[in-house]
Image (spheres, grey):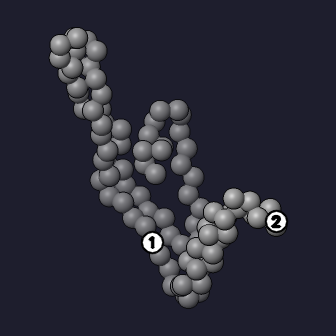
Amino acid sequence: MTKDNGHDDEDIAGSSMLKHLASSRSIDEYVTIEWKNLNFSTLVKDKSKSNIFKSVYTERKILRDLNGHINSGELLAIMGPSGCGKTSFL
């Protein structure tokens, strides 16, 4: 719902959440997010082995052994071609 000031309720809630997160840590505190050997896979239907009576699924690895980290104050860009697993990583 849009208020008279042009802001949605969700914008206001998100804004106050950001303010809380920004003020909940002192300036000398740092946060590091780290991931090691991150893997993600899903099942996809194998059309060559499936028929009308039985569906056969195979595992498709989306992310394989990803490692990385990001520190407070850094900007992280996740780039790559379509279908390479950017959204799955997020």
In this rendering, would 88 be left or right of 16? left
Disc number for residue 21: none
Depth check, front residue: 9 or 54: 9
Tag 1: amino acid? Thr
- Which of pointers 1 and 2 indicates the residue nearer the eye? 2
Q: Name the residue under label 1.
A: 32
Residue 38, visible in the rendered structure: yes
Identified at 36% across, 38% down, the residue is 62
Q: In which quarter of the image is residue 44?
A: top left
Depth check, front residue: 79 or 48: 48
Tag 2: amino acid? Asp
State the image coordinates of residue 13 (x, y, percent, origin top left): 62, 69
Identified at 52% across, 32% down, the residue is 82
Q: In which quarter of the image is residue 23?
A: bottom right
In this rendering, would 40 be left or right of 83? left
Whole-number angstrom distance, CA of label 1 to CA of label 2: 40 Å
Q: Quadrant of the N terminus?
A: bottom right
Q: Name the residue under label 2.
A: 4
